[in-house]
Amino acid sequence: MKRPTIKTFKVNKHFLFLILFFIFYTSLHAEYKVSFFDDKTHYKDISQVLDKEFLPTSRKETFGKKKFLWLKVNITNKTNKIEDNYLSLRNIHIMKDVHFFTIKNNKVVKQNISFNKYKNPDVKHRIGNILLYNNEISPNEKIEVYIYMTAGSNIYYEINNGSLIEVMAKAAKSSAILVILTGILLALGIYYLFLYLFTPNKEYIYYTLLVTTMATWSFYVYGGYAYYFDLFSIGAFVNVLMVFLPMFTTLFFQSVYKDTLQFKNYNRILNVFVFILLIALVYEVLGRVGLYELKFKVTGYLAFIYIANLFTIFIIGLIIYFKKLPLSGLFLLAFSANFIGVIVTISFFRAKLPYTEITFYGNMIGSAIEAILFSILLTYKMRQVYKDKEDAINATKVQSIKINIMSETIDFISHQWRQPLSQINASVMAIEDITYKNNKNMDAQELDKELLHIENTTNYMSSTIDDFKNLFSTDKKEEVFLLNKILLNSISIVQKTFENQNICIKHHIEKELFIKGNKGDIAQTLLIIINNAKDVLIERKIENPIININLFSDEKTIKIHISDNAGGIKESVKDEVFNAYYTTKNKNEGSGLGLYIAKMIIENKMNGSLYIDNIENGSCFCIELQKENING
């Protein structure tokens, strides 16, 4: 029993030894420290700075608008073997000259002064936007590497030291952030480009142009073209994109709120910016192609124009937010992310913030967040646009079904009045026959009988009109009413028509049930479903056709079941019968809107449900209304 315990102890001891050895071994690499010379006289020769005091600084740092800089890197080989040491300097795409000097015992033993961005960029020790400087360092030896660099606008750098694999791995890790952020922007741009091709909304194309320009310009600024494609000479071209960034931002902003009346005043201000940017773009491009000599470079003023444009949009964004324009909060949040990113990056370039991944990529991080939030904004906006269109279509459909129902109503009235009119006509003819044709006076009692019959008939006809007027009232206010009465009135309207078709309509009402809602909506729904059942019974030529209507309730709901004996409905189309324009009739006989409107009334306006089930020998339309709508 002890043997496994001893074996386990040995394994753990060996494992601990490996960990300690690894820690010890990794500490035996060349250490390095970076310092800089606060040069105010612009020394260019190495001999002029060897005896100067260098101040400690970080391995990656920004010096703002400084145009020249001397760095010193102290390297110590702590191993017991000769080390093939590499010093890497990243971000050379923003530098003009970079010179390396190896100093031992206060003497220059090695140098490399070949790199010049404009005259000699293709040096052997450059990989993308990284310069490598190699030294062989003896065991426990200390060396100093001086780096002289100049730049056109500002200086920021990242220095790494170690083996070739180590320094390139660190460079790749930093560049991976650039690839991820660029990938996000390009993916969103491509996605909305495809959306634009299928649904050509201006918002989509302006968004695509905006994020694509962001990605293209940022990829240059952060050294992506130099690192991945070895391109150094595209700065003039890419800087022109500084015109497009504010332009596409403005056009996107305008397209989002183009239909908002309150936004029209701000459109004029934004149009001024677009006009200025277009003039600047044309002037710069025509000058660069050689049509005339550029008196001044627009790109030198683009940063100011860009910031002014961002600030203006930010202020307008605040105003429309306080005015509570649709999606203004989301727009302001998205734009603020980019605005903050720009401020962070400017502060970084001016050496107001330290060199970190967040400050270095601040503008691009802000742009990525802005692009994502703008994408969400577009989704909400397009959803609202499509909803408005759908509501407009639905309103048209509702109007269409009302016209159809009005037509059916007239048909109902004609059926309801045909027999009473015949009875009145018969009474009039009886009076006429007795009084005029037979040349004899009518008995007063007999006359009263005929006149009473006429009066009862006309009263019935008048009540029919009242029923229709009450059921289809244009007054849409909700009220508490007796559902039983609406059901019975609906049945009475179609009763004569059904009798003419030999259709038996039966009803069973459990008790008086009150509901809160609109009478016309419920009546319209009942008539649609009842007439749908009638049409199916006639179409299928059912013998002894019957429609049963049951009104009852349970603890939670009021239920109306309208069933027939027409043979039921196929399971495959049960869910389709409520779709707009679905019909089994000929185009001239039905629009397919009835059941769609019925379902919309019950579920959207009454917060209930309408569905169909198959029963024995037929189908049953089930209306369920929640009891929270009931006040009686």
Image: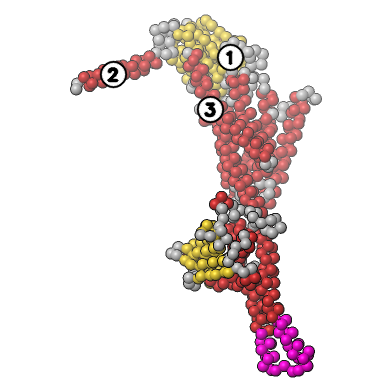
Whether the magenta-drawn stretch holds residue 425 is answered as yes
Measured from the top left, where is residue 45 in percent x and y? 58, 10
Measured from the top left, where is residue 153 in percent x and y? 63, 24
**Residue drawn where x is 64% and y is 42% of the image:** 313
Farthest residue toward the right? 291
Task: Give the numbered dot on residue 126.
Answer: 1
Pointer 2 local density, CA inside 10 Å: few below 14, some 14–19, many at least 20:
few
Disc 1 from disc 3: Cα separation: 21 Å
The residue pinned by badge 3 equals: 177
Span shown in magenta:
424-453
The amino acid on which the numbered mark 3 sits, given as a three-letter code, is Ile
Disc 1 from disc 2: Cα separation: 47 Å
**Residue drawn where x is 67% and y is 22% of the image:** 234
Kindly report which numbered mark, 1 or 3, lies closer to the viewer in this rendering.
Answer: 3
Q: Secondary structure at mark 2?
A: helix
Is the residue 609 above or below the residue 97 in the image?
below
Please state if 533 lies on the left or on the right of 302 as rendered: left
Task: Give the numbered dot on residue 11.
Answer: 2
**Residue drawn where x is 58% and y is 29% of the image:** 182
Whether the magenta-drawn stretch holds residue 29 is answered as no
Q: Earlier in the sequence, mark 1 or mark 3?
A: 1
